[in-house]
Image: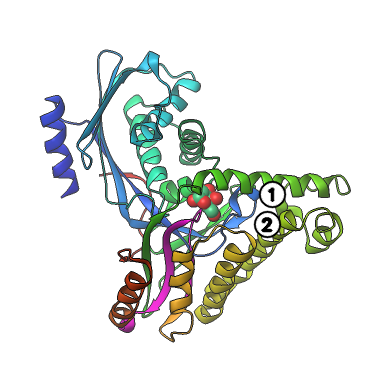
Amino acid sequence: MMKQKLQEIFLEQYAVAPTVIVRSPGRVNIIGEHTDYNEGFVLPAAIDKAAYVAMSLRNDEEIHLTAADLNETFSTTVSALKPVGDVSWPNYILGAVAQFAKRGVKLPGFNAVLSSDVPMGAGLSSSAAVECATVFALNHLLQTNIDRVTMVGMAQKAEHEYAGVMCGIMDQFASMMGKKDHVIKLDCRSLAYEYVPFKLDGIKIVLLNTNVKHSLASSEYNTRRNECTQAVEWIQAHHPEVTSLRHATIAMLDEHVLPKDELIDKRSRFVVEEIDRLLTGCADLQRGDIAALGKKMFATHDGLSKMYAVSCKELDFLVDFVRNRPEVLGARMMGGGFGGCTINLVKEEAIDALIAAVKPAYEAATGLQLDYYIASIENGTEII
Ligand code: GAF
């Protein structure tokens, strides 16, 4: 369906057929938030919502892009490659292209059409999906034979350099490396990873979309990174072996961070606790104890809201609403924060009743529309 739509639009736009069409998914993350850039662990998975990039190379150095869903086009040339003023969709593609140039690959021009059903600003990594799809398509067309994990790093750099968000590795890793019905237990220090089966009998992943994205999301994200770096520096002065919060302990925070600054202490304490919560939560999952995992998800939310301060009233409303409902085993805000979706583990037979209760309550409390998706876990980036 998507393939045919893209082929038609491509033909109409560029009068040739695309040589390749790549699908790269959005992601969920079960637990382990704001741990990736602290060299901790994460537990994400690719989902059934994805970005699609259709592409063919040109004989000149022109780059022509079409965003099918927005009905917008953008053109530039290989030699004029640079971020576009406003952070907007061309940056995710151009940022990925720039990574090939940085590797010394001689780039021809190309035509591309982008379409995506990953809701934007919903915390489902719509931008990482576009970056991964673009890197994958170019790697295929240019026959550069770059391995997947290296492509993950290139997609991450695209976000840093062209969108200005100093993101960790999780989103691009999940999009590129996802495996159907599995979550990825990823060690963000070594990039060692393990696929953990995630087929829960009678339980579904339900995403509740607040439909808000507060404007401080990216600036506060970068601030949190700096706060974590500050805590590491204070600890490192006494423990030179500590080069990230991954290596820090609660005792180190008590001794070297809390006496200096309560706010930095709260931020870093959340991260140290969250890395531990992920490891025990992943063990819960492997044992099939979803109730225990779910309780940890609520604890993660409370930490993100009260200690890390990346939640917002809309996300808190949704988590508080489901907290004592027996059909919801676990819930929390997901991703960078300040809006987007909550992730909920919900008993399948009660999903309709949950939505019937939460939707009008949220809409009455906030004046915003609540959208929801039942996510399935799918494979990562692929040619379709
Ligand atoms: C965003 C970032 F892109 C990720 O790298 C990660 O840090 C996440 O926020 C928070 O866990 O999605």
Q: Is residue 339 left or right of residue 15?
A: right
Q: Residue at x 38, y 62 (%)?
A: 210
Q: Residues within 10 Å of mark 1 (few under 14, many from 20)?
A: many
The circle drawn on residue 228 is 1
Front-most of residues 163 and 318: 318
Residue picked out by circle 2 = 267
Closer to the camera in the image, 323 or 276: 323
Q: Is residue 344 magenta?
A: yes
Do tag 1 and tag 2 residues touch (Cβ < 8 Å)?
A: yes
Mark 2 Cα within 10 Å, few/some/many (few <14, many 20+)? many
Provide the secondary structure element on which disc 1 rests: helix
Residue 127 in the image: state x and y as whole percent. Answer: 39, 43
Amino acid at pointer 2? Arg
Front residue of 75/155: it is 75
Mark number for residue 62? none
Q: Residue at x 75, y 53 (%)?
A: 247
Q: Is residue 170 visible?
A: no
Q: Say left or right for 122 vs 337.
A: left
